[in-house]
Image (spheres, rainbow, N blue to C red):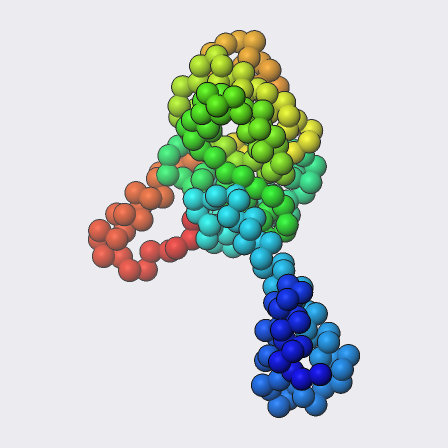
């Protein structure tokens, strides 16, 4: 069989990674001297790698992270902001997601809460864990729209599929009774079934007052706080520090977060 029909068959079978690797083998003098088993193994490895990369790209698209380049390696745990290096190392193993636990990251604006959340979410995507990111205002908007279209149950089902749900900026937008009940239902669906990551400028002890309704607040926090890791960041805004550094012409400002 000629090489061109083999390539076409691989393409028609959806083995595009193998097809590209086969073309490279045919164009390389070095690989032509390899055994059949070695060449086939190389083709299969390439197909497997291509499929893994495709699934990873799909997970990133579905996650909708605002900072898709955020990564654990770029987080500077030495900065004086309350981030413990040992805790960061432990969280980066993602065992807390496997254990269906939550993570609460609180601190003032600009200290890196969202970046840290996106870095952990990105790490999860790399390890074949499904992720969905939403800022609380966007979540509220989606709940309202779904309610108007009578598709709220579909939205809950959609969000429940994520092994990790990231809710950013919790406490930034007022939540009324119906929205609090929706949040309770969402968290109840995930309790002991999937992990939830929350970031907030509000200290955790103020969440009850933020939610307002004592009964709903008790129920929401019971499902959110008691089985959660906690990180409390502190310090000045890192964005402000970087802006000041650039304004002063400091070209050596670190890129680490």
Q: Residue at x 73, y 74 (%)?
A: 41
157 is higher (above) or lower (below) than 128 = above
Residue 15: x %, y % from top left: 65, 66
121 is higher (above) or lower (below) than 214 = below
Residue 107: x %, y % from top left: 44, 32
Q: Is residue 153 left or right of residue 206?
A: right
Q: Is residue 138 left or right of residue 166?
A: left
Q: Residue at x 37, y 34 (%)?
A: 109
Quadrant showing the N terminus? bottom right
Residue 234: x %, y % from top left: 43, 35
Q: Residue at x 56, y 35 (%)?
A: 165
Front one among 110 and 16 = 16
Give the quadrant of residue 21. bottom right
Q: Is residue 42 visible?
A: yes
Front one among 96 and 1 = 1
45 is higher (above) or lower (below) than 232 = below
Front one among 43 and 92 = 43
Q: Residue at x 30, y 43 (%)?
A: 240
Give the quadrant of residue 35. bottom right
Residue 10: x %, y % from top left: 66, 70
Q: Is residue 224 visible?
A: no
Give the quadrant of residue 104. top right
Q: Is residue 179 left or right of residue 45?
A: left
Front one among 252 and 156 = 156
């Amino acid at each position: 069989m000629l090489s061109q029909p083999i390539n076409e068959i691989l393409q028609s079978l959806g083995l595009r990674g193998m097809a590209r690797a086969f073309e490279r083998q045919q164009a390389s003098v070095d690989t032509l001297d390899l055994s059949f088993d070695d060449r086939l193994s190389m083709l299969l490895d390439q197909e497997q790698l291509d499929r893994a990369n495709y699934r990873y790209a799909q997970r990133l698209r579905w996650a909708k992270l605002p900072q898709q380049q955020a990564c654990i390696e770029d987080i500077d745990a030495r900065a004086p902001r309350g981030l413990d290096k040992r805790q960061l190392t432990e969280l980066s193993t993602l065992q807390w997601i496997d254990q269906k636990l939550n993570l609460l990251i609180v601190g003032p604006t600009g200290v890196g809460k969202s970046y840290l959340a996106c870095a952990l979410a990105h790490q999860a995507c790399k390890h074949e864990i499904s992720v969905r990111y939403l800022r609380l205002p966007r979540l509220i908007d989606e709940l309202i729209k779904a309610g108007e279209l009578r598709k709220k149950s579909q939205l809950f089902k959609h969000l429940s599929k994520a092994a990790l749900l990231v809710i950013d900026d919790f406490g930034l937008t007022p939540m009324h009774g119906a929205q609090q009940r929706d949040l309770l239902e969402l968290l109840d669906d995930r309790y002991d079934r999937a992990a939830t990551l929350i970031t907030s400028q509000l200290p955790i002890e103020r969440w009850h007052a933020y939610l307002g309704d004592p009964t709903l607040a008790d129920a929401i926090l019971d499902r959110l706080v008691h089985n959660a890791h906690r990180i409390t960041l502190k310090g000045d805004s890192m964005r402000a520090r970087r802006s000041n550094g650039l304004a002063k012409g400091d070209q050596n400002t670190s890129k680490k977060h």
